[in-house]
Image: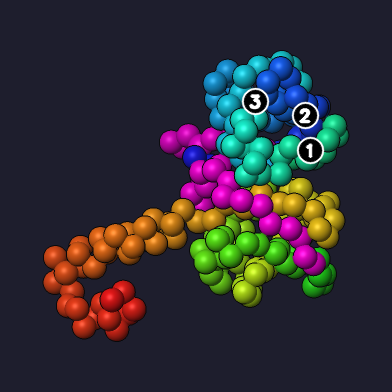
Amino acid sequence: MFTGIVEELGHVRDCRREGEGYTLSVNCSTVLDGTILGDSIAVNGVCLTVTALDATGFVTGLAPETRNRTALESLKKGSPVNLERSVTPSTRMGGHFVQGHVDGTGSIREFRKDEDALWVTIAAPAELMRYVVVKGYITLDGTSLTVVGVGDDWFSVTLVAYTQAHIVLPSKSVGDLINIEVDVLGKYVERLLQQGAFASGAQSSGITDELLKEHGYK
């Protein structure tokens, strides 16, 4: 589990096929503190397992599912990446509950300056857009952000000056792919509604059919 608050910008040492799989190695410093083999580190929002460590970085493997669902395979030597260690019981929850399980990719449609803030519009597929709501959480390349605008096939976020200086997103270009993880709470609610569990539980709590219909659950 992660918070979506980026701890460090690392840089790719290499991303290559090795045998029948892929390996990704990253140069970094901050996230090495306290990290041991088998720990999880989010790389651009993707939860990955540390398989090797040295004084300047770590190595991890990229499974086929990871390569298919994320933009990690497009990384090149020197590419900057957002890094965050998994949470501990004493971690400050500065963002939201981020699993590091990327749901898919979108593409950057527009950057727009607004005084010292930066608006970013992301084009996203329909299967992800149904979970995106104004003022809800979204995770972009591992960064916890608040949705400020929503269309049929796009959503927008805004970055304050501090965030711009500490994450990868502002260094990307229009058309670049970006890893997206939607708020897991939306997926759980959808699943419960599909199975009728919400209505069943609500009725057992004394909520009437009329109230459920009024709120669109029946």
Which of marks 2 and 1 precedes in the sequence?
A: 2
- Secondary element at image label 2: strand
Q: Amino acid at mark 2?
A: Cys
Span colored in magenta: 82-110
- Gap in Å between the C-alphas at discs 2 and 3? 9 Å
The Cα atoms of the two marked residues, 1 and 3, are separated by 14 Å
| Residue type highlighted by circle 3 | Gly
The reply to whether dot 1 and dot 2 touch (C-beta < 8 Å) is yes
> Is residue 193 in the magenta section?
no
Circle 1 SS class: loop
Amino acid residing under circle 1 = Leu
Where residue 146 appears, as percent x and y from the top left, is: 60, 63
> Is residue 105 magenta-colored?
yes
* Residue 111 horizontal/vertical position (percent): 81, 66
| Residue 106 in view of the camera | yes
Residue at image position (71%, 24%) is 23
Q: Which residue is mark 3?
A: 61
Q: Which mark is residue 15?
A: 2
Q: Quadrant of the C terminus?
A: bottom left
- Residue bearing the label numbered 1: 75
Q: Main secondary structure of the magenta part?
A: loop
Q: Could you tell me which residue is drawn at 62 percent across and 19 percent down?
A: 51
Neighbor class of circle 3 (other Cα within 10 Å; few <14, some 14-19, many 20+) is: many
Q: Label 2 crowding class (10 Å Cα cut-off): few <14, some 14-19, many 20+? A: many
Residue 9 at least partly seen? no
